[in-house]
Image (cartoon, rainbow, N blue to C red):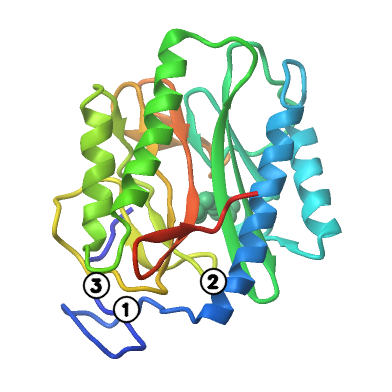
Amino acid sequence: MVFIWTTVKTNPGEIEGVGDNMINIRTKQEIEIMRQSNRLVAQVLKRLREVIKPGIPTRELDQIAERSIKEAGAIPAFKGYRGYPASLCVSINAEVVHGIPGSRRLREGDIVSLDLGAYLNGYYGDAAITVPVGEVSQEAKKLLEVTQQALSKGIEQARSGNRLLDISHAIQSWVESFGFSVVRDFVGHGIGRNLHEDPQVPNFGPPHQGPRLLPGMVLAIEPMINVGTWEVKVLKDGWTAVTADGSLSAHFEHTIVVTDGGSDILTLP
Ligand code: MF3
Ligand code: CO
């Protein structure tokens, strides 16, 4: 996927860089509404983490996710998005993202990424976690730990006055210091009235580049990290991205809002 360095923002009218893409600045009221869809996503992921055990078919996780979102009066955000057939993405082991739930059962030792989106009161929420199934290898444990920490490192850089790629750089340097690699073909994104808004949020790049971050920008930051090569390929189903070398991959995602002093994670249960 090509991504574009358009570096523009709206609302307080301060414009930097070139291009005509907009980064929306959300009001306090909009953030409170966005907190609801994002909190719901976090709550459902928490529930899924609890039901994960060896033997469960991934379709069952999708059904729980879809039911929980609908019961809360929300709409699953992924189902039908560009033709995606489910509410949840379930990506196991070498699968990076966009795994389609089905009859495959989780097995002891797997790591499984769960990515979920919800639409509620006009705004989207989006988050992902990667969960160990029973006891997993040392390598898998390390990958989960480093990927989750990479997300935290990125979020730490999401503050007013920093530039977008400060987030990207923090993630990349953390991950590569452990010998793991950052997926290039998929990136994080702005989110709000649409599931995907500007800017794209890569998990790699040089520091001090890109648009300046301002309070009210809402970003879904989502490092996808591989044990081996960063390269991925998409399976014949047209969705499932897997590592090119078959190595393990992990994925964590939070939706955050840039605030005056730093940032606020919206995807907390
Ligand atoms: N978190 C992913 C993203 O932001 C999930 C999208 S899955 C899709 O792209 F099915 F909606 F494409
Ligand atoms: Co996302």
Real-space Cα separation, disc 2 to disc 1, in angstroms:
14 Å
| Residue 15 left/right relative to 218 | left
Q: Which mark is residue 194?
A: 2
Q: Label 3 neighbourhood size at 10 Å, few (<14), some (14-19), many (20+)?
A: some
Query: Given contact means CB atoms under 8 Å apart, are the residues at marks 3 and 1 in contact?
Result: yes
Mark number displayed over residue 6: 3
Is the residue under label 1 in contact with that under label 2 (CB below 8 Å)?
Answer: no
Q: Position of residue 224 (x, y in %)?
A: 40, 38
Of the image marks 3 and 1, the number of the one nearer the N terminus? 3
Taking the image as drawn, is residue 193 in sight?
no
Answer with mark 3 or mark 2, whichever residue precedes in sequence. Answer: 3
- Residue behind label 2 places its C-beta within 8 angstroms of ligand 1: no
Q: Position of residue 207 (x, y in %)?
A: 15, 53
Question: Badge 2 local density, few (<14 within 10 Å), some, or many (20+)?
Answer: some
The three-letter code of the residue at mark 3 reads Thr
Helix, strand or loop status at disc 1: loop
Q: Is residue 123 left or right of residue 146?
A: right
Q: CA distance from mark 3 to mark 2?
A: 18 Å
> Mark 2 and mark 3 in contact (Cβ < 8 Å)?
no
The residue positioned 67% from the left and 14% from the top of the image is 107
What residue appears at the point 19 percent right and 49 percent down from the top-left corner? 205
Looking at the rendered structure, the secondary structure element under dot 3 is loop
125 is higher (above) or lower (below) than 225: below
| Position of 111 relative to 267 (above/below) | above
Secondary structure beneath label 2: loop
Q: CA distance from mark 3 to mark 1?
A: 6 Å
Q: Which residue is label 1 attached to? A: 21
Residue 40 point in image, percent of width and height: 69, 55
- Residue 246 occupies which quadrant of the picture? top left
Could you tell whether 141 is left or right of 20 in the image? right
Closer to the chain start, of discs 2 and 1, is 1
